[in-house]
Each structure stands twice: as C-alpha cells, then as structure tokens.
Image (spheres, rainbow, N blue to C red):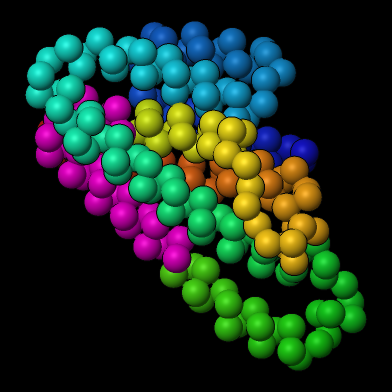
C-alpha cells in the first residue's frame, strides 16, 4: 500500500476519532500509530470505544429512544446504500484502472463508456453524501449526543460490514472482487468518505454555529 493511500486512511481514522473526548483521542491515535493494525481494525477499535462511551448516555430515556428509533435505522440504511454504491464504483474502477493499457486508452469506445458511466457514479456518491449530511443534521436537531452516536455507528458498520458480510456478486464480477482491495478495503473506505465525513461535517458545523 502506497504512502499516499496510508496517509488518506490515517486522515479518515483521525476523523473517526473525533467522536472521542480530546484526551482519549490523543491517547488512542498515539497507540494506533505505534501499532500495525489494519485500517478496518483501527476504525473498529475507535468506534467501539466511542460507542461504549456513548452507551453510558443511553441511560437517559430521550437518548435511548433516539438511538433505537433514529440512529440504528439511519446508520444501517446509509451503510447499506454505501455498500451498494461501492460495488458499482469498484467494478468501474477495476475496469478503468486495473485493465488500462495503451491500446485501451486509444479506443474511442472506452472513453465513450467512461463519459457515460462517470456522471452517474459521481451523482450516486454526491447523493450519498447529501443523505449522510441530512441524517447528521437531523440527529443534531435531536441532540449532539445523538449525532455523535450516529457517526460512531456509521464508522462501526463501515469497518465490520465488509469483514462479516459475505460478498454476493455475480460470477461475471469474480475477477473484480477476488482482489482484497475491492472486496474488503474499498467497501470500507467509501462509506467513511461519503457517509461518515458528511455526517461529521454536519456535527462540526453545528458546533461552530453554537460557539
């Protein structure tokens, strides 16, 4: 894995860690920096810790109701939608990047396909980010604790779903999802970018407005 990819994954990990208190965040990130844990494991560890911290606040009836009525359904739906989007994007990326060669790049039909599919993929990712931002804004309207729990659940599902959910792709796409990056890493990375970050942005925006 290249240095730029590792840096991008670390930035996502730092964003996930924003769900922790500042003193805990520094300690956890320091431990992860010294360890050799994978990106998914790191995100899962942070999300699990933040979820345990947030669980203490669920003793309040209002927070508990918001968790089961709002946080769980929204985090599940957003992550499921992100997984579906990731599958479509992964197939296109595999075809465009992993199979690109001089002959293919000189083929006019290749570029026609790119210009036809690319807008739809970008639109799907943009809509996913908008849904996540809207969900984060809605959660903030309930309480900041609810918004933090939503972000934590999204991070947790994004980290564990690719590991425990067996991929169900047609045999025609076996060449794509036989690769670990497209089968495990990318389905975790896309929800973090287009679901978790917009939800965190909604939380951060509300914090700045209330400052």
Seen in the image, is 92 located left or right of residue 204? right
Residue 16, placed above or below residue 121: above
Q: Position of residue 92 (x, y in %)?
A: 66, 67
* Residue located at (57% from left, 74% from top): 118
The magenta stretch spans which residues?
Answer: 124-150
* Residue located at (54% from left, 31% from top): 160
Question: Is residue 186 among the parts visible in the rendering?
Answer: no
Q: Position of residue 108 (x, y in %)?
A: 76, 91
Residue 96, image quadrant: bottom right
Q: Position of residue 203 (x, y in %)?
A: 26, 37
Seen in the image, is 175 located left or right of residue 147? right
Residue 115, image quadrant: bottom right
* Residue located at (47% from left, 13% from top): 26
* Residue located at (84% from left, 80% from top): 104
Seen in the image, is 47 located left or right of residue 201? right
Out of 41 and 77, give the one closest to the viewer: 77
């Amino acid at each position: 894995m290249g240095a730029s990819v590792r840096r991008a994954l670390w930035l996502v990990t730092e964003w996930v860690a924003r769900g922790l208190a500042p003193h805990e965040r520094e300690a956890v990130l320091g431990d992860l920096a010294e360890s050799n844990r994978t990106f998914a494991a790191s995100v899962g560890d942070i999300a699990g810790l933040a979820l345990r911290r947030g669980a203490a606040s669920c003793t309040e009836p209002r927070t508990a109701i918001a968790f089961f009525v709002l946080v769980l359904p929204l985090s599940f739906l957003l992550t499921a939608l992100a997984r579906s989007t990731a599958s479509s994007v992964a197939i296109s990326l595999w075809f465009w990047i992993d199979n690109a060669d001089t002959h293919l790049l000189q083929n006019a039909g290749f570029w026609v396909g790119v210009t036809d599919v690319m807008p739809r993929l970008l639109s799907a990712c943009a809509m996913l980010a908008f849904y996540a931002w809207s969900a984060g804004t809605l959660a903030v309207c309930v309480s900041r604790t609810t918004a933090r729990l939503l972000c934590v659940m999204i991070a947790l599902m994004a980290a564990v779903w690719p590991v425990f959910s067996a991929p169900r792709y047609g045999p025609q796409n076996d060449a794509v999802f036989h690769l670990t990056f497209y089968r495990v890493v990318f389905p975790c990375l896309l929800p973090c970018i287009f679901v978790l970050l917009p939800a965190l942005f909604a939380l951060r925006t509300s914090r700045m407005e209330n400052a």
